[in-house]
């Protein structure tokens, strides 16, 4: 049986401040590296903020741009693999994307396949589920609402992956956040039971503009048990050793 140390960040919501987001990613990643982590996850659209309005496209970043190359340069010192969300633009299209980066190099990306509500009028839908590898461990990505669909997790597990990385952003109206506060892990646990995947999630937390996000940021094993979770409403870094058959 092999093992790998994974990390995830429960971060404060950062609105349209990529420099601050980059600073937090470097700080948390450095701490995770000290604890032996090989991969770390940050929330959905973390780089620019999960902003769903007429300004969304203006916040977007082309992955071939000088701006993105500068961001990669700022991450060259980080040895572990980073997975974090951003608003991506490509031509006339806008995507809710998670990028996979190591030592300042873009290894690949996943574009959210299942869009909800106003997202459908802002983002273009992704079309595939790429799988990546770290130290012999294959992993894939589902973003937030993707986890409501068995097929999204199965698309990853069917490629011999063992770990599902889940950037999320549950900054919601108070009543909605309260309703869903304890349901997120229940849904994610079901996906683990169905697929036999380990799962690690990352979410924002705190209050902004009359909304709230409790989290949760957690690790769930293939039997659907939450084996580790950060306290709700508290920013922090989760570190866990995942045992892989």
Image (cartoon, helix red, strand yellow):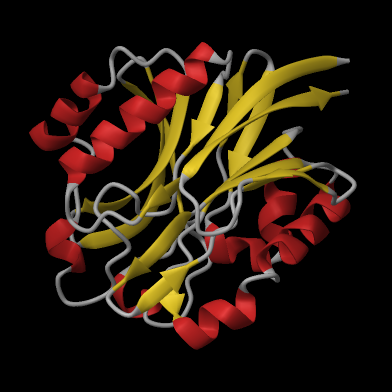
Name above or below for residue 159 compared with residue 167: above
Q: Residue furthest bottom?
A: 175
Q: Tell whether 94 sits left or right of 100.
A: left
Image position of 2 with respect to 68: above or below: above
x 66%, y 65%: residue: 184
Q: Position of residue 103 (x, y in %)?
A: 35, 14
Residue 25 in view (yes/no): yes
Pinpoint residue 29: horizontal percent, then vertical percent. 42, 25
Residue 9 visible somewhere in the drawing? no
- Residue at point 69% right, 49% down? 155
Q: Residue at x 22, y 58 (%)?
A: 15
In-image side of 45 versus 110 (left or right)? left
Taking the spot 90% from the left edge, 47% from the top edge, the residue there is 223
In the depicted structure, whether residue 174 falls above or below residue 145: below
Compared to 208, does 111 lie above or below? above
Q: Nearer the viewer, residue 172 or 73?
A: 172
Quarter-of-image position of residue 132: top right
Q: Quadrant of the N terminus?
A: top right
């Amino acid at each position: 049986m092999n093992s790998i140390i994974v990390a995830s960040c429960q971060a404060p919501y950062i609105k349209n401040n990529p420099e601050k987001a980059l600073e937090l990613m470097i700080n948390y990643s450095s701490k995770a590296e000290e604890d032996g982590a090989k991969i770390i996850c940050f929330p959905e659209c973390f780089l620019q903020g999960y902003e769903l309005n007429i300004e969304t496209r203006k916040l977007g970043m082309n992955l071939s741009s000088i701006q993105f190359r500068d961001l990669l340069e700022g991450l060259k010192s980080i040895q572990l693999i980073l997975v974090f969300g951003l608003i991506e633009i490509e031509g006339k299209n806008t995507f809710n994307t998670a990028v996979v980066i190591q030592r300042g190099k873009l290894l690949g990306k996943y574009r959210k396949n299942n869009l909800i509500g106003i997202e459908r009028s802002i983002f273009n839908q992704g079309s595939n589920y790429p799988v990546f590898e770290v130290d012999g461990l294959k992993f894939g990505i589902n973003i937030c609402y993707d986890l409501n669909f068995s097929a999204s997790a199965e698309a990853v597990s069917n490629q011999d992956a063992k770990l599902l990385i889940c950037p999320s952003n549950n900054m919601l109206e108070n009543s909605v956040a309260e309703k869903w506060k304890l349901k997120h892990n229940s849904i994610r646990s079901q996906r683990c039971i169905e697929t036999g995947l380990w799962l690690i999630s990352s979410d924002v937390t705190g209050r902004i503009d009359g909304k709230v996000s409790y989290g949760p940021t957690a690790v769930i094993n293939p039997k659907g048990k939450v084996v580790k979770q950060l306290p709700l409403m508290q920013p922090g870094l989760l570190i866990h050793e995942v045992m892989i058959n």
